[in-house]
Amino acid sequence: MKILVTGGAGFIGSNFIRLYLSHHSDCEIVNLDKLTYAGNLENLRDVENDPRYSFVKGDICDSDVVGDVMQGVRAVVNFAAETHVDRSIGDPSGFLRTDIFGVHVLLEAAREHGVERFVQISTDEVYGVTTGEPFTEDAPMNPRNPYSASKAGGELLAHSYFTTYGFPVLITRGANNVGPNQYPEKVIPLFTTNAIEDKPLPLYGSGEQERDYTHVLDHCTGIECVMDGGEPGATYNIGAGNHMKNIDMARLILRELGKPEELIVHVEDREGHDFRYAIDSTKLRALGWEPSFDAEGAVLSAVRWYVENPGWWQPIKSGEFLEYYEKQYGKRLEEAGGTG
Ligand code: NAD
Ligand code: TYD
């Protein structure tokens, strides 16, 4: 079975490709990725010579490239996206382009080529803030930043292809992922690598905000479950229920690394910061999915990976990253009395 994975050079896509190849001896995977700042072929060095795997550099918004790679494809898993909330606050335009228009280009080509399963990778952030019980899939969407609004747009469009054309779309809404190969703009690799370098951990606002820190391998087995057994037209939450406050996550990282808590610097909060995400994954568990990492296990296993792999993240924390870091944190840290 030939599968098109888009955005496979990123964090979750690369973990998914590795996992899927190891579980399905007879599959063929084509990875279409534009290689934005977040795409990194180092993430896939160990599979690049596997005859079942091939890479195409290209943009999901480019209908010519997408039409070419769709030849003979039976299933599509769309990971390709702009993904960082803080960057979306700075400039939403790239998010609208890839996370909405790109989904449209993929859906059109997939429909034309008779694709049998189209899995749109979405996020729990489309629900917005959870104040009470964890959200089930039928809760209304209430995205509150340009990233989550773009993702909501992309998945609504994908679902419309199911209701309008009967096209077999399945949607997953994953919680915050942690694990190997995550670009160090996201909080866990940022805090871990900063702490290793004795730099401040810029904690937004009070740090009382809460996320469900789900290990990327648990997210990937959830996606695999949906591919293999999910119902077309349905949406599945994928969260381990690993709820942790940001302040506790920061303290856990510092404790693991033997670094002082004084490295935590409370900086000006993110605009429109969603206080808490919590989702109910009962529907996915009914397909046989079980996460294997709890909250502390997920965070600590990620921390250890960055400790063991400085050769992966040190080159990334230069160039484009430094410009972004200065823009995002320079003034914040200065105002908070951190060293920057
Ligand atoms: P990432 O930023 O690490 O990787 C995104 C990948 O997409 C990169 O390789 C990039 O080069 C590629 N890409 C971006 N624009 C493209 C385009 N126009 N055409 C082709 N390729 C393009 O992201 P990630 O964390 O791996 O997230 C993957 C998917 O999972 C996204 O759709 C995201 O919304 C979703 N998701 C992420 C999380 C999380 O915690 N990281 C949680 C739930 C859902
Ligand atoms: P992030 O990794 O950006 O994921 P998301 O915003 O998509 O959930 O952030 C996770 C949490 O960590 C979120 O509550 C914001 C907080 N955070 C900080 O406190 N400081 C930071 O520098 C970053 C990047 C995030």
Image: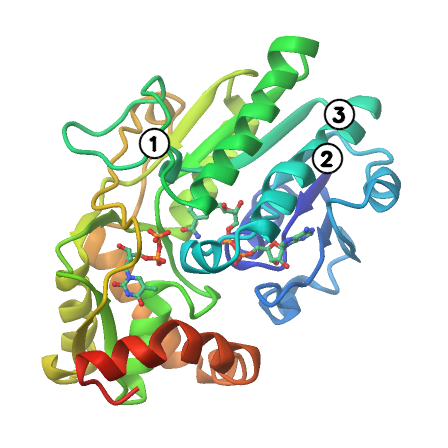
Mark identifier at residue 127: 1
Q: Nearer the viewer, residue 286 or 77?
A: 77
Mark 3 CB near ligand 1 (8 Å cut): no
Residue 40 point in image, percent of width and height: 62, 68
User: Looking at the rendering, in which quadrant would you find the N terminus?
Assistant: top right
Q: Distance between the residues labelled 1 and 2?
A: 24 Å
- Place residue 264 in its image quadrant: bottom left
Q: Nearer the viewer, mark 1 or mark 2?
A: 1
Q: Badge 3 is on which residue?
A: 115
Q: How crowded is mark 1: few (under 14 residues within 10 Å), some or many (20 or more)?
A: many
Q: Residue at x 33, y 26 (%)?
A: 285
Q: How far apart are marks 1 and 3 (CA)?
A: 29 Å
Circles 2, 3 touching at the beta carbon (< 8 Å): no
Q: Residues within 10 Å of mark 3 (few under 14, many from 20)?
A: many
User: Looking at the rendering, in which quadrant would you find the C terminus?
Assistant: bottom left
Residue 224 seen in the current view: yes
Vertical position of residue 224 compared to residue 48: above or below? above
Residue 50 point in image, percent of width and height: 73, 59
In terms of sequence position, does the residue under pointer 1 or pointer 2 come before the other?
A: 2
Q: Badge 2 is on which residue?
A: 106
- Place residue 135 in its image quadrant: top left
Vertical position of residue 330 compared to residue 294: above or below? below
Mark identifier at residue 83: none
Q: How far apart are marks 2 and 3 (CA)?
A: 11 Å
Q: Total marks drawn?
A: 3
**Mark 2 falls on what kind of element?**
helix
Mark 2 CB near ligand 1 (8 Å cut): no
